[in-house]
Amino acid sequence: MSTPFYVSPQQAMADRAEYARKGIARGRSLVVLQYADGIVFVGENPSRALHKFSEIYDRIGFAAAGKYNEYENLRIGGVRYADLRGYTYDRDDVTARGLANVYAQTLGTIFSSAAEKPYEVELVVAEVGETPEGDQIYRLPHDGSIVDEHGSVAVGGNAELISNYLDQRHQDGVSLAEALKLAVQALSRESNGTQREIPAERLEVAVLDRTRPQSRKFKRIVGRQLARLLAAEGAATEAESADNGEDAEDSEDSEDSGSSEE
């Protein structure tokens, strides 16, 4: 009888983590940003039926990158948890923190189990508060750890590159159009430094809007509304370029007048 091949627990965990990371990296990236009136979810998704972003409960949204069938199972489990807790106790008892803890336990158990492969998913759970200070964003990697994020977060293929871009440019209190512009710019960046164009029909956009009068704050932005926001950001860019050009012309005129006086 042959002796079974021994693999140390550390190496086994490292191999499982590498397997999960490679699976997640094959998926398209997505970003979650805070803006003045809530939280916006932006991702490249050519499918109109298989969503990356979904509503979990009144103020809670869900975003995921990786294998669709795996994160869809997690999404459904999260909806069931939220409905049961809200019905048993109170709707205010359903929080993003509690949901993130449930997801962390599930992902951690699957990742450490030798009987099944790790999930190739990375999740974001976000909750919009009454004020920007009350917003909560949690990122959950494949191993079940929880990372408390603020301002912006990116997951998926080029997450590190996109996160660095967002960290340098994202500011608190921006408008929805400005946040959408920044998200599209970040998603369109390539690892070689170039930038590609992402058409509106390939974008999936949703928001948790704290200004909505109804208790359910999740809303998808599609069609004409998305086109208007993209047009607004384009107009703002053109106006900024025009202002910069006028400033340059004014400085040249002042220099010419100064030289003629001499």
Image: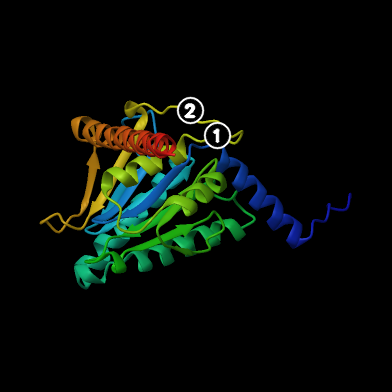
Residue 59 point in image, percent of width and height:
24, 59
Residue bearing the label numbered 1: 190
Question: At x 48% / y 40%, what residue is drawn?
Answer: 29
Of residues 156 and 93, the one drawn nearer to the viewer in this rendering: 156
Q: Evaluate whether residue 50 shows in this view.
A: no
Res 220 quadrant in image: top left
Disc 1 to disc 2, C-alpha distance: 7 Å
Of residues 260 and 251, the one drawn nearer to the viewer in this rendering: 260
Q: Evaluate whether residue 18 shows in this view.
A: yes
The answer to whether 33 appears left or right of 94 in the picture is: right
Question: Is the Cβ of the residue at disc 1 closer than 8 Å to that at disc 2?
Answer: yes
Query: In the displayed image of the protein, which residue is found farthest to the front?
Result: 262
Res 149 quadrant in image: bottom left
Residue 116 point in image, percent of width and height:
59, 50
Res 7 quadrant in image: bottom right
SS for tag 2?
A: loop
Residue 196's disc number: 2
Question: At x 41% / y 62%, what residue is drawn?
Answer: 150
Q: Amino acid at mark 2?
A: Arg
Question: At x 33% / y 35%, what residue is drawn?
Answer: 246
Residue 41 point in image, percent of width and height:
34, 46
SS for tag 1?
A: loop
The answer to whether 162 appears left or right of 86 in the picture is: right
Residue 241 point in image, percent of width and height:
36, 34
